[in-house]
Each structure stands twice: as structure tokens, then as C-alpha cells.
Amino acid sequence: MPVYRDEAVVLRTHKLGEADRIVTLLTRQHGKVRAVAKGVRRTASKFGSRLEPFMVADLQLYEGRTLDVITQAETLGAYGALIAEDYPSYTAATAMVETADRLTESEGSLQQYLLLVGALRSLSRREHNASLTLDSYLLRALSMAGWAPSFHDCARCGLVGPHDHMIVQVGGVVCADCAPPGSPRLDTETIGLLGALLEGNWAVADAAPENTAARASGVVSAYTQWHLERGLRSLSHVSRESSV
């Protein structure tokens, strides 16, 4: 059976039998992979802790008929325990890996892989508020998947902005002519923060007041739930408390 190596982020795990585990991975080169890790639930397992959610590892696998099999695992990023000890970071990371699971398939998705690894690393190091890190990740992951929002020009007709009517179903802000009657409007500060989160401009994002960040989070949540159709189960459990 063909053997291959790849870097991977652990998205989720399921028990299999008495000692094995099915691991869903987002890999650097092979997209999303479901594989069996045999014996990892035994206390004597050499790499059970390396295959927990949010961990990044260098793996050796061989191709199976239905599921691949993990034979080696070397830790590249031990983010799991660091994230799990902080509740806002844990809930944010849970929403991130669910998003990656929903947006990626078997084909390679290097940009999605690198974005997720960077976001998990940032959460583990408490570089920014966990809620802001999640919002930035969601906007950028959706953009890579083809749902890039517009927070300046009109998302419907392309009229140069700035505009302040927000319609998530259309894809961002719209001009006064394209805005349906009664459509919500956003203040300049919230629109500016949304743009900063999309661009990864942390100097602006970190300086945003809590009320502005809360409004931006509401927009990001609505945008994400709309475009993923079935929504994210984990998003309702996300803690929006400050973790920095």
C-alpha cells in the first residue's frame, strides 16, 4: 500500500473500538484526510497525545481502502493543551476547526491549512483577543473559499464606497440605491474594524473598543452562518470574553 508523509492539523477525533481512534485531519498537501490511529487510546501509546484536536504534526500514513492509517506522528505545534486551558481560546479554536472541516475537501488547500495553523498558533500564544482572532480567521477563510466580503465598495453594483448599509446575503456593504428599505446600517468604526480583521491589520483591530468589537462579531457570525448554510454548531458556544 502507498505510504506518504504530510503535515497536518487535527480537526476532530472519534473513538473506534477499544483502543483506536478515527482522526480527521487538514493536511498541507492532501486536503482533508480521515485516518485511523491504532492503539492511541492505550496509556502506552507513543503518539496518542500528538493526535488531539488543535495539534499540528508531521505524519506518516499509508493508504487504506476506506481510511488511511497513521503509522508515525511527530509534533510540530503543541497547541492543544495551551488552547484548552483558556476557555475563550478553546471555544474560538473549536469554531475554527469546524469551519476548516466544512470548507475543505480531499483536494489540497494549502492556503486554508496555513491560515488555520497561524490562527491556532496565535491563540496558543494569546497574541490577540481570542474573539478577534476567530473573527479574522472566519472572514479570511470564507474569502479563500470564494465568499470574500466587501466592507468598502458596494457588494451589489460595485459603486466605490465607503457605504454603511450591511447586507450579509449580498456579500457586505451596499450603497443607498441598492439597500432595501429598513436595511441595517453600521457605524464607521465597526466597518473599519471589519476591514482590519479581513486584512489582518492587528494594529487597528487590537485598538478597537469592546462595543465596536462586539458589533463586528455579530456581523461576522451572521455572515458566516449565512454562507455556510447549515451554520456552525460551535459558534453558539464561543466565549466573547477578553482573554488578553
Image (cartoon, rainbow, N blue to C red):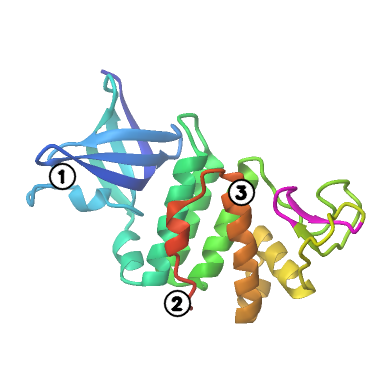
Tell me the number on the disc at residue 40.
1
> Which residue is label 2 attached to?
243
Q: Is residue 56 above or below residue 216?
A: above
Q: Nearer the viewer, mark 3 or mark 1?
A: 3
- Front residue of this view, candidates 60 and 22: 22
Query: Which corner quadrant of the image does residue 237 belong to?
Result: bottom left
User: Magenta residues?
Assistant: 167-176
Q: Percent from the top left, x then y, of residue 183?
A: 79, 60
Alpha carbons under labels 3 and 2: distance apart: 27 Å
**Quarter of the figure that contains the N terminus:** top left
Residue 104 as seen in the image, left or right of residue 221: left
> Which residue is label 3 attached to?
226
Helix, strand or loop status at disc 1 = loop
Q: Amino acid at mark 3?
A: Trp
Q: Residue at x 76, y 64 (%)?
A: 184
Q: Amino acid at mark 1?
A: Val
- Front residue of this view, candidates 241 and 65: 241
In terms of sequence position, does the residue under pointer 3 or pointer 1 come before the other? 1
Crowd tier of the residue under label 3, counting other residues whose Cα lies within 10 Å: few below 14, some 14–19, many 20 or above: some
